[in-house]
Amino acid sequence: MATYSKNREFAFILNDVARLLRTYADYKAAQFGMTRAQWAVLVRLDRAEGLSQSELAEMLDLQPITLTRLLDKLADSGLIERRADPDDRRIIEFGIGLTDLVKRPTKTIEELKREDFAEGRFVLSRKLEEFLPRVIAFNGKLPYEQFAQRKCNYGIQKELLYGAHVYVLPTTIGATPRGKSERLKHFRKLADLVKRTEKSREAQTH
């Protein structure tokens, strides 16, 4: 009868325990309609909010493309929110700027006060005056209505803001998979608007 060292036996037991824990984690995650991998992402973000995608991929030992798919599903279900990294300046090179109308974090948009939006209008106005964008997109009706002080529908707005075309998108905050096709339709229309605006600018410079 073969005999094994205690270290080897311990390694086998440790492997069995890890396998059982993974099986149990799969079972518990399924009760909430998610996978163990999605649950692992939520746990990491709960412990360290604001992680970059590269940091998260390294922690979970996942390939970037695999993590991207997980994050897409979690964002579509409203469980996480993607935020621009203020230290990543590469986006400016593509002529794109991202900002918030209100910086104060809240659980729901209903918690925001009139004073929050008033301050946000002032700050955003200064940014628009400084950078003079050709196209402005608002994520949801409420931010645009609070900024422009008028009601709106989704899509291109008739009025310009600081000489820029304005597009109001369906909000991606707390979005459900059911509305994904509608959001994609509007994002494609926004892309077409950007292309037309850029072509018009190029024609004027020649």
Image (tube, helix red, strand yellow):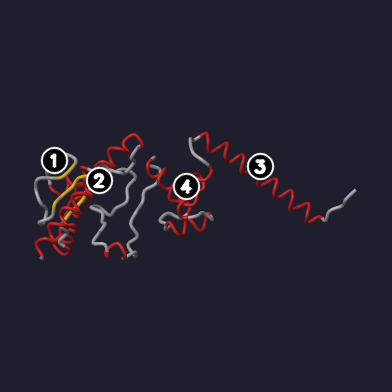
Q: Earlier in the sequence, mark 4 or mark 2?
A: 4
In the image, 206 versus 173, the foreground residue is: 206
- In the displayed structure, 110 sits above or below 116; it is above
The residue lying furthest to the right in this view is 1
Q: Earlier in the sequence, mark 3 or mark 1?
A: 3
Type of amino acid at the residue the image marks with label 3: Leu
Type of amino acid at the residue the image marks with label 2: Arg
Residue at 61% across, 43% down: 22
- In the displayed structure, 20 sits above or below 88; it is above
* Dot label at residue 188: 2
Residue at 12% across, 57% down: 200
Circle 4 sits on which residue? Answer: 42
Q: Earlier in the sequence, mark 3 or mark 2?
A: 3
Residue at 73% across, 53% down: 11
Where does residue 203 sit, x and y in percent of width and height? 11, 60
- Check disc 2 and report its element: helix, strand or loop: helix
Circle 3 sits on which residue? Answer: 20
* Dot label at residue 151: 1
- Check disc 3 and report its element: helix, strand or loop: helix
In the image, 2 versus 15, the foreground residue is: 2
| Callout count | 4
Closer mark to the observer between disc 1 and disc 2: 2
- Check disc 4 and report its element: helix, strand or loop: helix
Q: What whole-number distance in Å separates the C-alpha atoms at marks 1 and 2?
A: 23 Å
- Check disc 1 and report its element: helix, strand or loop: loop
Q: Is residue 39 left or right of residue 163?
A: right
